[in-house]
Image (tube, rainbow, N blue to C red):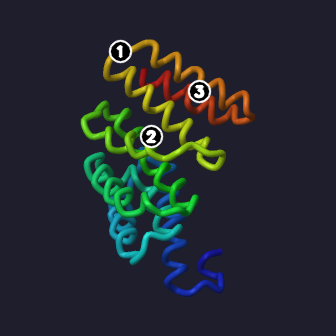
Amino acid sequence: MITESELSEKDKEIQNLIADGLLELLNPDKSDQKIREEIKKKIFEIPKFNSTKFMLYCNSMRFYSLADNEAIVRKIIEKYQVRESMLVKKSLFSLAINVLVLSIEENKFENIDFYIDFANKVPTNHDLFFYKSAMTFFTYFIQYKKNQDKSALQYCDTIIKSFCLVGMPEYGGELQKFKDKYK
C-alpha cells in the first residue's frame, strides 16, 4: 500500500521504516540487527522533533541501550519541557514512562530521578491524568523494587483498580501483568 500510495518518496521511505520497525518489535525472538540499525540511524536524520520522529523513536526505544535512551530522553525533555503544547507534554511523558519501564526491566535505577522529577513538576490536569497515573504507578513500583516497600505495591494496586474503574480494564490488566512479571 505504501509503495502504491501518492506519498512523496521521502514519506514512503519513512512510512516503510515505521512499518519495518513495528514488525521488528513484534518479532523480538527473530531480531534483524540491520533493520534496527537502519531505524536508529534514520530516526536522527529527521531534522526536527515532530510527531513522526517522536513516534519512530518512542516505538523503537527497545533498539537502544538503557544508557542511550536515558541520554536521548533527558536531552529531549530538557529541550522541550517548557513548551505549552499538550501534545509535546504527552510525548515527553511517554518517553519518561518508557525509560522507567526499561529501567525496571533491567533492574537499574541509578538515573531515574530526573524523569520522576520532570513528571512531578508538571501540574496534573484532565489531559495529562492518564500519563501522570501511569508515571505514578511506575514510580511506586520502582520504590517497591529498590526498597522492598510493600506499601508501594498497595499504591500500584490502587492505580490498577482506578484504570479498571474508569473504563480502561485492558490497560489496568497490562499493568497487573507487568507488576506480576517484575515483582
**Mark sitting on residue 148:** 1
Depicted 63 relative to depicted 52: above or below = above
Q: Which residue is mark 2?
A: 120
Q: Give the quadrant of residue 183.
A: top left
Relative to 158, 21 lies left or right: left
Q: Position of residue 92 (x, y in %)?
A: 46, 54
Q: Secondary structure at mark 1?
A: loop
Q: Position of residue 73 (x, y in %)?
A: 35, 54
Query: Mark 1: few, some, or many residues within 10 Å (few <14, many ≥20)?
Result: few
**Kind of residue indicated by mark 2:** Asn
- Seen in the picture, residue 79 relative to 114 is either above or below; the reply is below
Q: CA distance from mark 2 to mark 3?
A: 16 Å
Q: Nearer the viewer, mark 2 or mark 1?
A: 2
What residue is shown at x 51% (from left), y 49% (from top)? 26
Q: Nearer the viewer, mark 2 or mark 3?
A: 2
Amino acid marked by disc 1: Gln
159 sits left or right of 136 in the view: right
Q: Name the disc covering residue 163, or none.
A: none
Disc 3 residue type (three-letter): Ile
Q: Quadrant of the N terminus?
A: bottom right
Q: Element under label 3?
A: helix
Q: Which residue is mark 3?
A: 159
Q: Which residue is found at the position 39% from the left and 20% from the top?
A: 144
- Give x and y (percent) for residue 31: 39, 52
